[in-house]
């Protein structure tokens, strides 16, 4: 019998998973490393961990491509890899949303129920990115060759990021709770990114061989 997916929806647990993934990536700190996922399919933890690994690799590729001395050919390869990762990230977010919709889509809505400006999974996506921001900003506060002024600026930024983490986590939990009780409802929309589609990007379909 196939195990059903465990929909894990608590932001505290999400944060633990995102930090575990971020730390696991930095054990090698290599965009080419193969990182084992400690969670098992089909549980939500697996997808959240994988989501942050995608974000971690993309984060560091974005750093690499900004090196002013990078070889242009190599930069183009990295740019295309970033595009692929961004599509993977979007696909993962949409999958998480589809799982949440499957769980809560039939909840009876309150007469005055409203839809949120973003879906739960896109809010969760921001929490994953925030885990990376906090990790790297903390590293900057500990950098030995940085000036005292730089360290202090980064310390203040870290305080803001930590406050943002508290607010975003609370908002995610509240949103999912409101959806689960019918106070809010969700819809799922595909992002429909046109630049990656050879049938929608004129630079691609006009140059088919």
Image (spheres, rainbow, N blue to C red):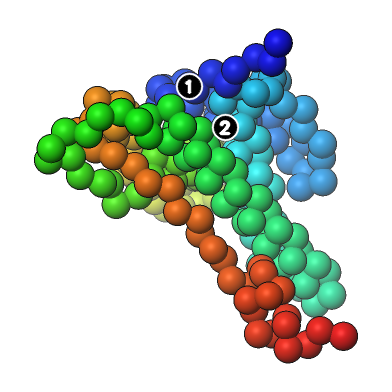
**Quadrant location of residue 105?**
top left
The relative height of residue 188 versus residue 74 in the rendered view (above or below) is above
Looking at the image, which residue sits at the far right?
209
Tell whether label 1 touches label 2 (CB within 8 Å): yes
Q: Is residue 29 left or right of residue 8?
A: right
The quadrant of the rendering that contains the C terminus is: bottom right
The quadrant of the rendering that contains the N terminus is: top right
- Regarding mark 2 in the picture, which secondary structure is present there? helix
- Regarding mark 1 in the picture, which secondary structure is present there? loop
Q: Nearer the viewer, mark 2 or mark 1?
A: 1
In this figure, which residue is indicated by the disc labeled 2?
A: 48
Work out how far the residue at label 2 is from the one at label 1, CA to CA, in angstroms.
9 Å
Residue 73: in sight, yes or no?
yes
In this figure, which residue is indicated by the disc labeled 1?
A: 8
**Quadrant location of residue 114?**
top left
Q: Is residue 185 left or right of residue 12?
A: left
Q: Is residue 153 left or right of residue 206?
A: left
Looking at the image, which residue sits at the far top?
1
| Picture coordinates of residue 41, whole percent (x, y) | 68, 23
| Picture coordinates of residue 138, whole percent (x, y) | 50, 38
Residue at image coords 69%, 29%: 24
Q: How many marks?
A: 2
Label 2: few (<14), some or many (≥20) within 10 Å?
many
Label 1: few (<14), some or many (≥20) within 10 Å?
few
| Picture coordinates of residue 51, whole percent (x, y) | 60, 39
In the foreground, 148 or 64: 64
Residue 166: in sight, yes or no?
no
Residue at image coords 12%, 40%: 112
């Amino acid at each position: 019998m196939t195990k059903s997916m465990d929909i894990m929806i608590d932001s505290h647990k999400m944060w633990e998973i995102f930090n575990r993934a971020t730390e696991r990536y930095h054990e090698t700190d290599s965009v080419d490393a193969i990182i084992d996922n400690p969670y098992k399919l089909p549980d939500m933890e697996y997808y959240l961990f994988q989501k942050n690994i995608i974000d971690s690799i993309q984060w560091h590729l974005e750093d690499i491509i900004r090196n002013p001395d990078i070889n242009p050919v190599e930069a183009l390869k990295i740019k295309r890899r970033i595009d692929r990762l961004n599509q993977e990230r979007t696909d993962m977010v949409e999958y998480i949303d589809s799982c949440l919709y499957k769980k809560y889509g039939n909840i009876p809505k309150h007469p005055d129920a409203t839809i949120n400006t973003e879906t739960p999974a896109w809010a969760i996506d921001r929490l994953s990115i925030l885990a990376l921001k906090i990790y790297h900003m903390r590293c900057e506060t500990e950098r030995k060759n940085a000036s005292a002024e730089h360290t202090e600026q980064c310390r203040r930024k870290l305080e803001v990021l930590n406050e943002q983490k508290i607010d975003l986590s609370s908002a995610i939990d509240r949103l999912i709770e409101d959806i689960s009780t019918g106070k809010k409802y969700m819809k799922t929309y595909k992002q429909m990114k046109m630049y990656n589609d050879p049938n929608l990007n004129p630079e691609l379909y006009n140059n088919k061989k």
